[in-house]
Amino acid sequence: MDKRRIKDWTLLAGARVEIRQQGTSVCTGYVEAVTDDGKILWVSSPAQNRRLFEKAEFYEAWAAEDRDGFHYEVTKTLEKADEASAQ
């Protein structure tokens, strides 16, 4: 299943996510907590300690899980950029 950018972070508690910043993957793990306004989340990763990510710093959460309530926003420009960099 392809990963999709999750616009509403309030739905991500307990989900497995990939955190990207400007198209680059920076962390993969499980969301431990999210602020009520959905602007900050904490990700626990086996390879790293618990980390905090803020939307204001251009972080994006991507998930492959098909869970009820996820609001996917497919960002074609980022997907095309990823494809171009892979070539």
Image (cartoon, rainbow, N blue to C red):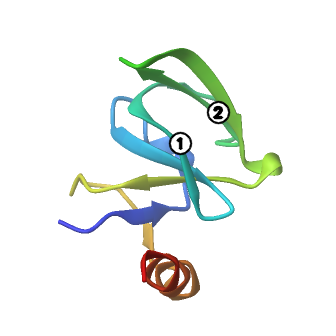
Looking at the rendered structure, which numbered label has been put on residue 25? Answer: none
- Residue extending farthest to the right is 56
**How many numbered marks have been drawn onto this rendered protein structure?**
2
The correct choice, above or below, for 44 with respect to 72 in the image is above
Within-10-Å neighbours for mark 2: few <14, some 14–19, many 20+: few
Q: Quadrant of the N terminus?
A: bottom left
Q: Which sits in the foreground, 47 or 39?
A: 47
Where does the image place residue 68, in percent across and percent down from the top left? 25, 54
> Going 55% across and 61% down the picture, which residue do you hit?
7
- Compared across the picture, whether 51 is left or right of 87 comes to right
Q: Residue 67, position in %: x, y?
A: 23, 52
Mark 1 Cα within 10 Å, few/some/many (few <14, many 20+)? some
Q: Is residue 48 above or below residue 14?
A: above
Disc number at residue 10?
1
The residue shown at (49%, 87%) is: 80
Identify which amino acid the numbered label 1 is placed on. Thr
As helix, strand or loop, the secondary structure at mark 1 comes to helix
Residue 62, horizontal then vertical, whole percent: 44, 55
**Amino acid type, residue under disc 2 in the picture:** Asp
- Indicate which disc residue 36 carries: 2
The one nearer the camera, 83 or 53, is 83
Quarter of the rendering occupied by the C terminus: bottom left
The residue positioned farthest toward the left in the image shown: 1
Give whichever of discs 2 and 1 has the lower sequence position.
1
Closer to the camera, 45 or 5? 45
Q: Are marks 2 and 1 in contact (CB under 8 Å)?
A: yes
Secondary structure at badge 2 equals loop
Q: Residue at x 60, y 64 (%)?
A: 23
Residue 63 place in picture, x, y as percent:
36, 53
Q: Is residue 19 above or below residue 87?
A: above
